[in-house]
Image (cartoon, rainbow, N blue to C red):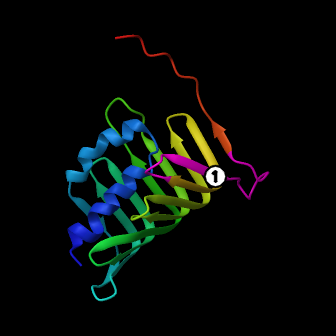
Amino acid sequence: MKPRDSTLLPLGCFLLGLTVTPAAHAAGDDADEPIRINARSVEANEKTGTAVYRGHVVAEQGRLSIRADRVEIRARDNQTELIQAIGSPVKLRQQPDATTEEIQAEARRVDYHVLSGKLDMIGDVSLRRGDDLFTGSVLHYDLDTRSLSATGDDRSDGRVHAVIQPRKPTPPA
């Protein structure tokens, strides 16, 4: 298992994919930045293609960061298949650029299925950009089709909640 090719670069893609906004994809130059992962421990097994980071895991790449209790990366034939982050909660942040509001997301578990381009956020999901807020119990996002589905929050009325602030029109160029 080659660390840069099989495990670290997809983590950056995972973080980029969480943002669900076109401005975030402009931050693609972050993929060229080094990924820094800090944890209390790591267990990697090249034979099984797994790496498990435990204990206050912090992964950063450029303007992207993830904080979790545990991050597991599974690969086969030098291809990352799954990146799973578990926490109380998992916290993700991205500052796409200097003119775009910071994006923050939280969930108890985040699964990124690398090969299919699917992202699942599970348990007490919260996604915030500026004053816009989305909450629910489960969020599924397809990076290829840019489609999203969500189910309601179990703790309240079983519904998905969104607060979207009005935007000022952009003046013509």
Q: Is residue 120 magenta?
A: no
Q: Residue at x 37, y 50 (%)?
A: 16
Between 161 and 151, the one lying in front of the other is 151
Q: Position of residue 40 (x, y in %)?
A: 35, 76
Between 140 and 60, the one lying in front of the other is 140
Q: Residues within 10 Å of mark 1 (few under 14, many from 20)?
A: many
Residue 153 quadrant: bottom right
> Majority secondary structure of the magenta segment?
loop
Q: Is residue 123 left or right of residue 147?
A: right
Q: Quadrant of the N terminus?
A: bottom left
Residue 7 quadrant: bottom left
Answer above or below: position of 14 versus 131.
Answer: below
Q: Residue furthest bottom?
A: 47
Q: Is residue 48 left or right of residue 129?
A: left
Q: Residue furthest top?
A: 172
Q: Is residue 46 left or right of residue 109?
A: left
Magenta stretch, residue numbers: 142-160
Q: Residue at x 56, y 48 (%)?
A: 148
Q: Residue at x 26, y 48 (%)?
A: 30
Q: Position of residue 72 (x, y in %)?
A: 41, 74
Q: Residue at x 35, y 42 (%)?
A: 25
Circle 1: residue type? Ala
Q: Is residue 148 magenta?
A: yes
Q: Position of residue 91 (x, y in %)?
A: 47, 57
Residue 164 quadrant: top right
Q: Quadrant of the C terminus?
A: top left
Q: Which residue is mark 1?
A: 150
Answer above or below: position of 2 versus 106.
Answer: below
